[in-house]
Amino acid sequence: MLRVLDDAVGVLVDGHQAERRELIRREEALRAEFVDDLLRGDADVSRMVERAEPFGVDLGKPHHVALVAPRDAGGRIDRAATALERAVVDRFGDREVLVAVKDGRIVVVLPSAATPAGAAARGTDIGTLLQQDLRRLRVAGRWRVAAGRAFPGVWGVPRSYEEAREALGVADRLGLDADVVHARDLLVYRVLGRDQAAMVDLVRDVLGPLERARGGADVLIGTLQAYFDAGDVATEAARHLHVSVRTVTYRLARVAQLTGCRVSRPDQRFSLHAAVLGARLLEWPTRPLPADS
């Protein structure tokens, strides 16, 4: 009798656990489907608002989207997502928060109210907080966090997501070393990238003459970029480039000689800087400029 009862209890427990696992799988599938539709921007607005309610998400409020992407082979997305989800819930609560994996990246959706007032000025914006959590939890690998701006409404989430996605792409193409990038800081690249034909013309017309320099345009473009990054301070640019100040000033004079544009003239400096940014986006002169533009 006891053996029969024990077997019956075992069957009941196994059945209960199997049902629970199946319930969890269904909930995870529904959540993944909802996140995909939310990030894509489903046209059925009322339906999206209705589907958001069980997840505690009020789509009438502004939301940020942050993307967390591995920067080396040591990053395990599944483990990082689990650890980061616990950290996000502990920090912000389980309402209005979504953490999911999409296209090999961790997606974090947070309401703009989750960031304390003045936090950005203290360097504790959403992107920085997520990066701090990854380091505090000792998540293996190196990670880059890209944060989109907060926008209200059903279409606000996909807009913020696209900004974060573009920020990651631009950071990769420019070879930025920063572990946290913000869409607001890369808006100039979005402006340049919207009209590639104009950008190609700008790079070709302004910087094209630098190809006549001995050794090509690479060194002179790198010097211009370092000079602009240093706030137009030649000594700081020289320190970054590991050359003398005299070398920097000589190269800038050579740029002026070849292009007719001087960094000391505000209008010409702007053209040079915009062209250098465009060249980095186009990966020129490493790659040839598009011939059909």
Image: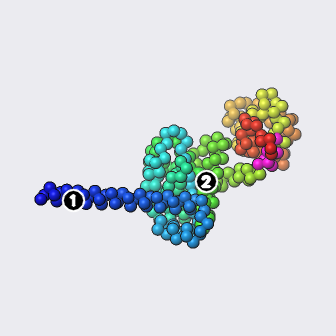
Q: Looking at the figure, which quarter contains the N terminus?
A: bottom left
Residue 260 on the magenta span = no
Q: Nearer the viewer, mark 1 or mark 2?
A: 1
Residue located 42% across and 60% down the image: 26
Number of numbered discs present? 2
Amino acid residing under circle 1: Val
Q: Please give the residue where the numbered disc 1 appears in the rendered image.
A: 9
Rendering quarter of residue 286: top right
Residue 201 on the magenta span = yes
Q: Please give the residue where the numbered disc 2 appears in the rendered image.
A: 164
Q: Main secondary structure of the magenta part?
A: helix
Q: Quick one: SS at disc 1? A: helix
x, y percent for residue 239: 68, 34
Residue located 18% across and 57% down the image: 6
Mark sitting earlier along the chain (1/2): 1
Residue range of the region highlighted in magenta in the rendering: 196-204
In this view, which residue lies farthest toward the top?
A: 214
In this view, which residue lies farthest toward the left?
A: 1
Q: Looking at the figure, which quarter contains the C terminus?
A: top right
Amino acid residing under circle 2: Ala
Q: Is residue 35 something one can see in this rendering? A: yes
